[in-house]
Image (cartoon, rainbow, N blue to C red):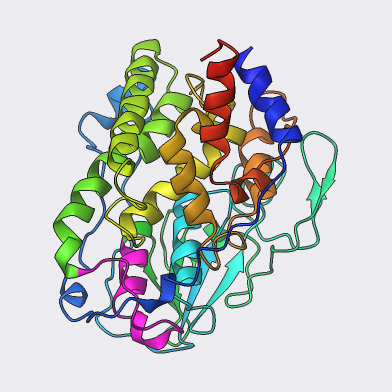
């Protein structure tokens, strides 16, 4: 009954316009201290007993290996390779948009449908297909955001890595067009570079997502958000061991409870302005209702069951550039189109349009309580 009411509400409740964007690009502070803190910003999973753990059914995320951290940057020199369905790519694209770096860092977008077994470079690899293709469900799919490889002229990401003798296949990639080399493929380090050394080159050079006075708190939040939410969703969804799944499930929603408490007194995680912690949280929370609730078996609750988290999600989604950098159709195709029977869900109705109604979750909770269903 709960989920039925949720779906009906998505299709029936009108969206309100919401415009709280004007404060975003007014932050006035220096980036000098933040520029000193760009090295190894990743929260990484232990690789101990890796083969044994994976063989036992546990999903264990690997560690990125292209880890050059830039101390200076030049406009027009660097290029970003992303796939919007990948949450790690998503957060780099969000940082690029929020900081106004679109004219500073060029970007190519991969197809959310990966290669099949008959592809010359192998199966399950990121590919460039702006012309579209026929997906596993028999439907031809094409996405306006997808591009060719405008820098290296390759058909897949693995071919770019092979140019440098690297046996890797992950995205995002930050690429140096001047020296024709891979700079970095760790998303957390890429966004930190965007927030620091690239910041003066963008449209909003006085905006900080990693201000020095909040650095300790941001790092604390980044740690549990990555472990229990960002990577936790994958550990729940891709582990074949029941105990691992259940532990990840419990930690995921315990972290939601913690965030709900934080947001009772804050618009964003660290106060009235968004920070890197919000940026890292958003891709997972944005995917939860249409993807992770089902695909990752995280079906304890919808975001709208958490009024403060819902309001936060709406506020972040309303920031300039976020909606444009968050094409949900890429995400649904990417997750559902290559697993199970490869059919892609149509719904949920009204999502993400309802993210323009920041009071929806509160109104929903009141309606359920009045009906005796809360």
Does the magenta portion include 212? no
> What is the x, y in percent for residue 47?
24, 37
**Residue at image x 56%, y 10%?**
372
| Residue 167: quadrant of the picture | bottom left
Identify which residue is drawn at 53% across, 25% down. Answer: 366
Question: Residue visible at 44% across and 47% down?
Answer: 312
Q: Quadrant of residue 191?
A: bottom left
Q: Position of residue 270 (x, y in %)?
A: 27, 54
The answer to whether residue 147 is above or below residue 371 is below
Nearer to me, 331 or 309 = 309
Q: Position of residue 207 (x, y in %)?
A: 35, 76
Question: Is 205 colored magenta in this rendering?
Answer: yes
Query: Is residue 348 visible in the rendered structure shown here?
Result: no
Farthest residue, direction front: 370
Q: Nearer the viewer, residue 374 or 174?
A: 374
> Considering only vertical position in the picture, is 134 above or below 158?
above
Horizontal arrangement in the rendering, residue 148 relative to residue 213 (left or right): right
Residue at (60, 69) in percent of width and height = 108
Closer to the camera, 63 or 17? 17
Q: Quadrant location of the N terminus?
A: top right
The front one of 335 and 216 is 216
Which portion, as a residue range, is magenta?
189-211
């Amino acid at each position: 009954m709960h989920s039925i009411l949720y779906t009906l509400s998505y299709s029936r409740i009108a969206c309100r316009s919401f415009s709280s964007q004007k404060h975003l690009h007014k932050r006035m502070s220096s980036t000098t201290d933040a520029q000193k803190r760009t090295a190894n910003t990743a929260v990484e999973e232990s690789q101990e007993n890796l083969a044994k753990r994976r063989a036992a059914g546990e999903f264990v995320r690997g560690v990125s290996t292209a880890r050059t951290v830039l101390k200076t940057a030049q406009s027009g020199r660097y290029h970003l390779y992303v796939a919007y369905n990948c949450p790690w790519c998503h957060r780099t694209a969000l940082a690029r948009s929020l900081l106004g770096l679109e004219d500073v860092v060029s970007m190519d977008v991969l197809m959310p449908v990966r290669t099949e077994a008959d592809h010359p470079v192998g199966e399950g690899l990121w590919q460039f297909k702006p012309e579209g293709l026929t997906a596993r469900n028999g439907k031809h799919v094409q996405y306006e955001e997808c591009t060719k490889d405008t820098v290296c002229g390759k058909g897949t990401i693995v071919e770019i890595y092979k140019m440098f003798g690297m046996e890797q296949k992950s995205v995002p990639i930050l690429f140096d067009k001047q020296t024709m080399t891979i700079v970095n493929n760790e998303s957390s380090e890429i966004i930190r570079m965007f927030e620091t050394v690239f910041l003066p080159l963008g449209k909003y050079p006085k905006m900080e997502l990693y201000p020095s006075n909040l650095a300790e708190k941001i790092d604390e939040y980044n740690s549990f958000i990555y472990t229990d939410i960002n990577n936790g969703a994958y550990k729940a969804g891709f582990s074949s061991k029941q105990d691992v799944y259940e532990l990840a499930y419990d930690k995921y929603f315990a972290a939601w409870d913690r965030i709900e408490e934080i947001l009772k007194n804050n618009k964003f995680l660290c106060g009235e302005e968004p920070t890197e912690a919000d940026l890292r949280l958003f891709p997972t929370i944005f995917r939860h209702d249409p993807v992770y609730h089902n695909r990752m078996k995280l079906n304890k609750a919808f975001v709208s069951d958490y009024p403060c988290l819902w309001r936060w999600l709406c506020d972040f989604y309303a920031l300039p550039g976020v909606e444009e950098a968050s094409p949900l159709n890429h995400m649904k195709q990417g997750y559902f189109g290559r697993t199970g029977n490869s059919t892609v869900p149509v719904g949920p109705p009204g999502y993400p349009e309802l993210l323009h109604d920041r009071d929806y979750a509160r109104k929903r909770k009141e309606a359920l309580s009045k009906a005796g269903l809360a």
